[in-house]
Amino acid sequence: MYSNLVTNVRTALAYTVQAIRYADSALILFLEMSAFPLPPNPIKIQFYQDVVDNLTEAYLAMKALPFDTYFPSDPVFPNAPIAPQSQDNQHLIQLSDNRISLALDKTEDTINYLDQAILLSGKNDRLNGQLFFIKLSLEAARDALVSGLNEPDFDNH
C-alpha cells in the first residue's frame, strides 16, 4: 500500500511540473500580445499568474512530504514556449488557450492521483492533512485556470 501511495504522489508531482510549464508558457504567450487595437486583459494575466503560483506551492509541498518523491525521468524543458514567432494576436490567444487547456488537463489528472494518495494514506492523520492541503492548492489552481479561460482576452475598459 505504501508503494502505491508513493507512486501516486510521484505521478501527481510529475503532472504538476507539466501543468506549471504549460501555464507559464500560456502566460508568456499571452504577454506577447500587442496592445493594438486593445490591450490584453490584466485580469486574465492575473489569473494565469495565480495558476503558476498555486501549482508551484503544491509542487513545493509535495517535495516536502516525508518520503522520497524523486522521479527519475523528470524531463527538463526550456521555460520559453516553443511556438512560431507571431504578431497576430488571435494566433497568440489560440496558442495561449491551448496551453491553458493542457495545464487544466494535467491539473485534473494531478487532483485525481492525489485523491488516490489521500485514500491510501489511511489513518496517518499527518500525511492525510498534508495531502489534503496540497489538494486545496491544486483546486485553487484549477479554479483560476477555468476563470482565466472564461475571461475576455482584451481589456474593454
Image (cartoon, rainbow, N blue to C red):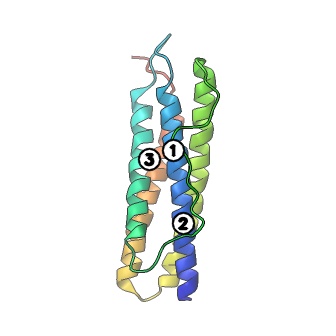
Residue, far top: 37
Helix, strand or loop at label 1? It is helix
Q: Nearer the viewer, mark 1 or mark 3?
A: 1
Q: CA distance from mark 2 to mark 1?
A: 16 Å
Q: Residue 135 location in percent, x, y?
A: 44, 65
Residue under the image location 52 percent in, 72 percent down: 9
Disc number for residue 12: 2
Residue under the image location 50 percent in, 25 percent down: 32
Q: CA distance from mark 1 to mark 3?
A: 7 Å
Q: Residue 19 location in percent, x, y?
A: 54, 52
128, above or below 102, in the image:
below
Mark 2 residue crowding within 10 angstroms, few (<14) / some (14–19) / many (20+): many
Q: Are marks 1 and 3 in contact (CB under 8 Å)?
A: yes
Helix, strand or loop at label 2? It is helix
Q: Which comes sooner in the sequence, label 2 or label 1?
A: 2
Q: Is residue 80 left or right of residue 157?
A: right
Mark 3 residue crowding within 10 angstroms, few (<14) / some (14–19) / many (20+): many
| Image quarter of the C terminus | top left
Residue, far left: 126
Q: Residue 53 location in percent, x, y?
A: 38, 49
| Amino acid tagged 2 | Ala
Helix, strand or loop at label 3? It is helix
| Amino acid tagged 1 | Ala
Q: Quadrant of residue 47?
A: top left
Disc number for residue 131: none
Residue identifier under label 3 = 51
